[in-house]
Structure formats: C-alpha cells, structure tokens
Amino acid sequence: MQIGNEKIDKSFKIALASKEQNLHGYLFAYFEGSGPRDKDEQIRFGLSEDAVNWFALNNNQPIIASEQISSTGGVRDPHILRGEDEKTFYMVATDMSTAKNGWGHNPGIVLLKSNNLTDWKHGFIDLEKTYPAKFKNIQWVWAPQTIYDPAAGKYLIYFTVKFKDKVKLDFYAAYANAEFNGFENEPNLMFSPKYGAIDGDIIYKDGIYHFFFKGNTKDENGKEIKNGIRKATAKSLQGPWVEEFNYLDAYSAKKVVVEGSSVFKLNNVDEYILMYDLYTNKRYEFQRSKDLNTFSAKPESFTKNFFPRHGSVIGITRDEAKRLNDKWGGIPAILFKNQ
C-alpha cells in the first residue's frame, strides 16, 4: 500500500488549507503533574489564542473521569486529532494507573470520539486479552496516537509496545474500526528504531511523513550514552522508515532528559511547534521549525496556569473555543473577539 503520490499529496494539501481557514485558537489535551497520581492521571483541556499563553478549562480538573473510560482507572498521554470531516474529534490515551499498579504493567489504550469536543463516546482495548496469540507476553502499551491514512481512508492508531522478555521498545499499529472503539485488525509492527524508542508522533508535510520519537544512542556494550528527540521519515505510513540519528531537541547535548514530544502546525502560517516535557525539571518547553528538519536553537517556555504532562495540541475555531468555555469555563474573552 503506497501513499505520498502526487495526486494524494495535492488533495491532502488542499484539505489541510481548507481546514485552517477558520482556525483561530488552540486546544491542549494533557494530564497533570502537580498533585497525587490518582488525581493527575486524567484528561484535562487547556485553551490558547496564540499557542504560547495557555489557560486551563474546568479549573484544571478532568474533563472526563478516568474511572469512566479506562480499565485501570488511570489515563496518561492523551493525543487529540481533528477528523477529515473537520467536525469529528478523536482521542487516544495510555490506559495506565501508576497510582494503583505502579510502572510494571499496563494492558492497553483508551479510545474516545466526539462531534463537539464536550461529549465523548469511549472504549478501551486490552491487547493481551483481545489478541492473546501475539500479545500474551506484553508489558507496556504506551502513548498511542492517531493519524488519518488517505490511501486507506482510515484512521491508523500507533503506539509503543514492550514485551516482558525483551528490552527493546518498538512501535505497533492498527486501523481503528468505524466506531472508533476498537481495532479492525490485529496490530502489527510498524517501525523498529535501532535502539528502541517511545512517544511516537507523526506529522505529514509536503509528501513526507515525519515520525518523531524519544530515542537514544548506545555504545558497543549496549550502554545508553545519549537520549532525546529524534525522527524517521517515509513517503508512506507503511514505510519503509528511514531513521535519522541526529537529535532535534535543545537538551540532548546537555544530558537534560525530555520526553512526550508533540509537533503541531500553527494556524494559517507555515511554522511548526515541537513541544516536550522536561519531566525531571518540571518544565514544558518548545522549539520552532519551518521545515521539520531544523529547529530553533533556543527553547521557549509556555505561560500557563496548569502543569501539563505529555499531551497534544490541535487548532480550533472561535465557535469551538466558546463551546468549550460554555461547558467548563476558565478562558479569557480574548478568544471570542470578533464574533
């Protein structure tokens, strides 16, 4: 299955341009890092007009309780996507409660679907129970994300997998079913970085899929000597993925660890934001790029009234911002100007 040909590339660009015309703000889906883990591991929303200055919705409380949508009672790493019809929204997240179960094991992922950003239908997948032949020895299923595959006309969900008898972490993927509450097929290996990786994030630009991830470098004895944000590229979501071994974040050379990277395009301009979680330093920062190959050398900080962990951002309209604020509150009126 091939994508990235001229016809698909042109139609995809037209669709992207059409979507952007009415986007005037941003929605940040995240989980918290400031309190006890049983309270933090739940999905929250923040809004911004400029993607730099952020305000939490709902007084930084969950927009949906993890106990309602997950098998473990905890949810981490939410990824949100606007659908191709421009009015359906998809979220996936790690089904994991470290407060209850620690870091030893988690069963799968949570899937959510909405047509208004405020009311969400949900399902979850336990990979070990659903696909025991392949995943009976699974240990972790982390940081799922969704991307539309124009060649298949379907939504592809990809995520990090680690098996109990292996050290290496790889990326697996499967197409979501039409209801977006499960997979239509057994997940298969999507991409196996040389040294393993976590926190995959794919963004499409000019006929190329850019697969960002937290990777590492090891010496001849298998000892990690460096880690940070790297990427691979391909013309198709089916690969082959060409892995690049240079680091893109500003901290890898300083041995300051980052994770949970997410890339999003700014509304109506040809500029991208690479944001990441400095989880040991309790900071969330970003760098800018126009080509997804080179990034600003000096990281910038968000201003915000919340403490996000691994999350994602989409552009939204003023009507959508108003709808979110009407539901949960917390957003200054500046987002609704020129209504």
Image (cartoon, rainbow, N blue to C red):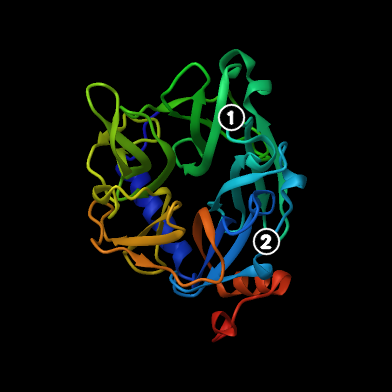
Q: Which residue is mark 1?
A: 104
Q: Quadrant of the C terminus?
A: bottom right
Disc 1 versus disc 2: nearer the observer: 1
- Identify which residue is drawn at 49% across, 26% down: 162
- Identify which residue is drawn at 31% across, 45% down: 207
Question: Based on the displayed image, in which of its 4 quarters is residue 178 positioned?
Answer: top right
Identify which residue, 307 or 260, lies in the foreground.
307
Residue that protrudes farthest toward the right in the picture: 68
Identify which residue, 267 or 69, lies in the foreground.
69
Q: Quadrant of the N terminus?
A: top left
Measuring from the top left, give residue 174's x and y in whole percent.
53, 30
Residue 116 disc label: 2
Q: Is residue 187 above or below residue 269?
A: above
Q: Is residue 170 left or right of residue 304?
A: left
The kind of residue tagged 2 is Asn
Measuring from the top left, give residue 243's x and y in whole percent.
27, 34
